[in-house]
Amino acid sequence: MMRATALVVAIAATAAASSWGSATGGNPQQPPQGGWPQQQQGQQQTPYQTTPWGQQQNQQWYDPGYPQDNRQQQQDWPGKAEWEEEQRKQREEQEKQQNRERAMWTLKQRFPGENQKTLERFLTARKDDADAASEMLGASLRWRRAYGFPVEPTQIAHQLAQGTIFSKGKDYEGRPVIYHIGPGVPPGATPQQIALAVRAAVYWMDEATARSPDGKVTVVIVRDPSAPRGGRLAYPRELAKILELNFPEALAKACVVPADGLFRGLWGVASRFVDEKTRQKINLLADQRELLRFVPYQELLQSLGGGNAYRFALGDVKGIPKEWADYHAQLQSQQFQQPAWGAPPQRALPPSSGWQPGQQAPPARPGAPPP
């Protein structure tokens, strides 16, 4: 039985070998006629040539649907440098904005009682450095407590009544305009008079920045070329120091009119000690007509070539007693003009106020008799 089975297996193997040899030309080691399937004669077979893509030589075995990132063959296109520069600027601006938002959040946590505009000004002054801005703002808060801030208008009523500094109207951006007319203090002013003039300027700066949409103001400085020169540098020097440390970035622009050759020469020397950002805010104007570039006609005072007929009145200041305001209005109606610049201080308050020239105005006394 076993011999019969072995014989059947041998016969089957012999038949299979003979059929394969006939198909290959009698040699099972040789390829059939026409070559192996999917193989060309004389070409070495590769693994992916058995796929449909392998029928063509050098054809990619995978096509993602877009050109490959071949850095060696990549070429520049027109405008590539500009596009890359624009992308870089956008990334830097986005990073700068994120840093400012983080710094602003830090300031709000440290000074919860301060308004947004004040925090933004101090942060801008210290180039978005939260720690430096916190130190500057903390020093300003200590100065305010020592200075008696906010300034009480009844303490500087006489200085306000002179009408040499006040705020009226808006510029083209909607910011309040502060007018500073004349030198601010008379020749030979005493330290007390200088201190009162500085407090008056601080009062108007605080009042105007509070009304400004972005916390900034425009200042129009009207010079008096005929006023005596010299001896009054203490007033602008003291005022500039206070504004720089306690009202940073509050000045949008300043217009000085008229700026003659002598003043331009002096400013050319003094501007060397002023940073570039502040210098760009100072505008030296030859005459009043150039003010219309910064203040609209309907907002500019008539005395400066505009259409606003406003004349400063002490009654426009909030917190001034009515009898003081009435006395000042009566005095103005008698004079029909502003006091001469550089003239000795006149009695701008009624005798019942108890004020004497060169002294701080006392608090209002309710029920005091009219002058």
Image (cartoon, grey):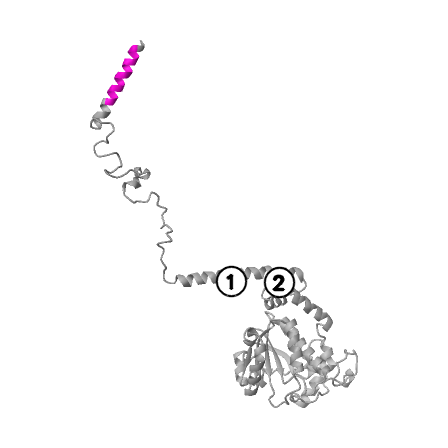
Q: Which residues are magenta?
A: 3-17
**Residue situated furthest top in the rendering:** 1
Is residue 130 in view?
yes
Work out which quarter of the rendered image holds the N terminus and state it: top left
The secondary structure type at the circle numbered 1 is helix
Which residue lies under the disc numbered 2?
Answer: 130
Measuring 66% from the left and 73% from the top, which residue is drawn there? 206
In the drawing, does residue 362 fall left or right of residue 93?
right
- Residue type at mark 1 is Glu
Report the residue at 75% width, 83% height from top: 359
The quarter of the displayed image where residue 12 is located? top left
Seen from the viewer's position, the closer of residues 191 and 325 is 191
As for residue 357 lying within the magenta part, the answer is no
Residue kind at label 2, given as amino acid type: Ala
For marks 2 and 1, give the CA distance: 18 Å
Relative horizontal placement of residue 161, taking residue 225 as reference (left or right): right
Q: Give the tally of numbered discs.
A: 2
Q: Is residue 154 above or below residue 132?
A: below
Quadrant showing the C terminus: bottom right
Task: Find residue 109 and report its horizontal and vertical position in percent.
Answer: 65, 59
Q: Position of residue 256 (x, y in %)?
A: 57, 82
Expressed as whole percent of the image width and height from the top left, the position of residue 173 reads 55, 73
Q: Are marks 2 and 1 in contact (CB under 8 Å)?
A: no
Q: Nearer the viewer, residue 255 or 44?
A: 44
| 11 drawn magenta | yes
Q: Circle 1 sits on which residue?
A: 93
Prevailing secondary structure class for the magenta stretch in the rendered image: helix
